[in-house]
Image (spheres, rainbow, N blue to C red):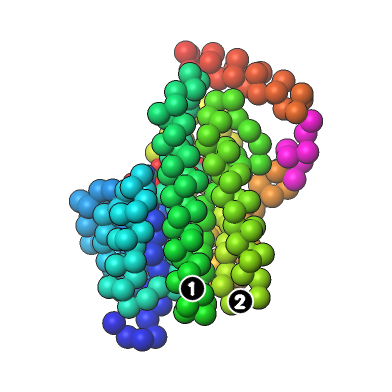
Amino acid sequence: MKESQKRAIIIGTSTGIGRALAKKLSAEGYAVGLTGRFPEKMKELQQELAGESFVRVIDALDLRHATHELSNMIMEMGGVDILVINAGVLHPNPELRWDLEEETIRVNAMAFAGIANLAVRYFLQKNGGCIVGISSVAGHRGSGRSPAYNASKAFMMNYMEGLRQKLSTTPIKVVDVRPGFVDTAMIRGRKGLFGVVSPEKAADDIFRAIQKGKRIVYVPSWWAAVMGVFKRIPESLYHWGYWRYIAWDTKAQKS
Ligand SMILES: NC(=O)c1ccc[n+]([C@@H]2O[C@H](COP(=O)([O-])OP(=O)(O)OC[C@H]3O[C@@H](n4cnc5c(N)ncnc54)[C@H](OP(=O)(O)O)[C@@H]3O)[C@@H](O)[C@H]2O)c1
């Protein structure tokens, strides 16, 4: 591979936003590292990519193995310029089952931080690079339906702010991507969603944000205004709205 070749790795690429972003980066001339749990799906994706790509099987639940494989992939690709930490799980968890809460925290928060840590060390040595974390608008408030999911996204947002502060005197960029609703398996079948965008639109917005060197990007951008208000609503009013929504949603699911 040529020294001048641009390189990107995406954590979690079999489906949804990660898959669309792999296609976008490849079309933009990047050699792309695909990682995820399912080799067949990634091999399938490889066939659809315009340029060179690499595959590694990683499971974020096994962080030690995941970071080991990621280091190997960086070596195999001859380096990396952009590392996108996209892997995430959302379990609606009305019974507050601990196994579901734990998986969410381990994938969305623990693995995120472990992989970001590796990326920071690598990019410091290289003296440049870009870390992209896919958080969510959900990180702005708690959720009675899936407490671990919203809390894990708040963790990501806060962690990335910390990294930006730590790295502010270096050329390393940290981009916090906060999608609203994106039409992927994660939200499919849920009723009452608004402003849903395609994974391809999300990938375009993410790529543009990376190119412009943005710190935080909402997908689509109008979510910034919505969240500016939403995060200031008093907790009592927020709970009132939440219970009204749950009552409406329960009825809608039955119909
Ligand atoms: N869809 C939305 O409305 C929305 C809104 C806000 C934020 N987000 C965030 O966007 C990111 C991508 O989600 P999506 O919407 O594209 O949903 P998705 O299609 O369900 O994709 C989830 C991704 O996470 C990866 N993943 C899950 N568990 C993993 C594990 N244990 N190890 C490695 N990878 C794992 C999956 O990779 P493999 O299947 O390849 O293993 C897959 O690529 C998530 O972080 C999500 O929280 C989504």
Tell me what residue is drawn at x 32 percent, y 85 percent: 2
Residue 58 in view (yes/no): yes
Please, what is the three-letter code of the amino acid marked with disc 1? Phe
In this picture, is 115 found above or below 72? above
Tell me what residue is drawn at x 39 percent, y 85 percent: 4
Q: Residues within 10 Å of mark 2 (few under 14, many from 20)?
A: some
- Residue with the mark numbered 2: 170
Q: Nearer the viewer, residue 103 or 2?
A: 103
Q: Nearer the viewer, residue 176 or 168?
A: 168
Expressed as whole percent of the image width and height from the top left, the position of residue 121 reads 48, 69
Residue 163 falls inside the magenta stretch: no
For the N terminus, the image quarter is bottom left
Q: Residues within 10 Å of mark 1 (few under 14, many from 20)?
A: many
Mark with earlier residue (1, 2): 1
Residue 13 in view (yes/no): no
Question: What is the C-alpha distance between the residues marked 1 and 2?
Answer: 10 Å
Expressed as whole percent of the image width and height from the top left, the position of residue 8 reads 40, 68
Tell whether label 2 touches label 1 (CB within 8 Å): yes
Q: Mark 1 CB in 8 Å range of ligand 1? A: no
Expressed as whole percent of the image width and height from the top left, the position of residue 82 reads 46, 69
Ligand 1 visible in quadrant: top left
Residue most toward the front?
A: 64
- Residue with the mark numbered 1: 123
Please, what is the three-letter code of the amino acid marked with disc 2? Thr
Helix, strand or loop at mark 2: loop
- In the displayed structure, does residue 153 sit left or right of residue 226? left
Tell me what residue is drawn at x 63 percent, y 66 percent: 166
